[in-house]
Image (tube, rainbow, N blue to C red):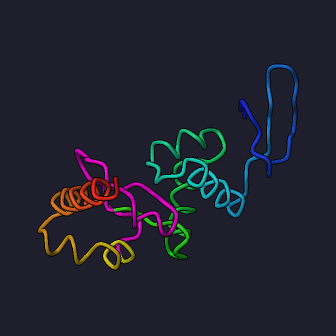
Amino acid sequence: MAVKSKPKELEVVYEDEDVLVVRAPDDEELEKLVVDIIRRKGRPVTWKELRKELSGLAGEDRLRKVLVRLIERDVVVEMIDGTFGLKGMEATYVPRRIKKRVRPLVPTKFRERWGAIVGSRGSIAAAIQYLREIKLREKRAVN
């Protein structure tokens, strides 16, 4: 697999002027890479962003499996808009507007965290809009 820069934990298999080939990460290393990507960005990331960052290192099934484990251990939070952030990011995150919300990866955790607001608003889309308005008002009040 050719990459522009080597993730620091991965073993280099071959390297020359044009190509860097690294050993694919095991599941534990992949978990660390996912957490590092989110931490480096400093905000929740989309499925598409994670897939792009990890293309060539892990397929969608492995990535999904790793995300499920991280969500179940409360390391990663699946935000109401479908993005993935580190625990605590949900307190200040302003949800993105979305065209279509996909099914949560871990429905039980999603319901625990977001069920009350979704239930009170009637839909995920209405809950996202409500949270956006609240978070934007809070930001304006701080500034």
Q: Position of residue 138 (x, y in %)?
A: 29, 60
- The residue lying at 24 percent from left, 57 percent from top is 137
Q: Where is residue 140? Give x, y as percent.
A: 28, 53
Q: Magenta segment range?
A: 80-107
The answer to which of 48 and 128 lies nearer the viewer is: 128
Residue drawn at 43 percent across, 48 percent down: 46
Quick one: which residue is furthest to the top in this view? 17
Picture coordinates of residue 143, whole percent (x, y): 34, 52
Q: Can residue 104 be found in the magenta stretch?
A: yes
Q: In which quarter of the image is the N terminus?
A: top right
Q: Which residue sits furthest left?
A: 122
Q: Does the magenta stretch include residue 64?
A: no
Q: Determine the residue positioned at 75% across, 44% down.
A: 7
Q: In this view, does 116 lie to the left or right of 104?
A: left
Q: Which of 137 and 38 is in front in this view?
A: 137
The percent coordinates of residue 118 (x first, y second) are 20, 70
**Residue 120 as seen in the image, left or right of residue 100:** left
Task: Please tell me in which quadrant of the rendered image residue 77 appears.
Answer: bottom left
Viewer-proximal residue, 57 or 140? Answer: 140
105 lies above or below 108:
above
Question: In the image, is 27 to the left or to the right of 123?
Answer: right
76 shown above or below 47: below
* Dominant SS in magenta: loop
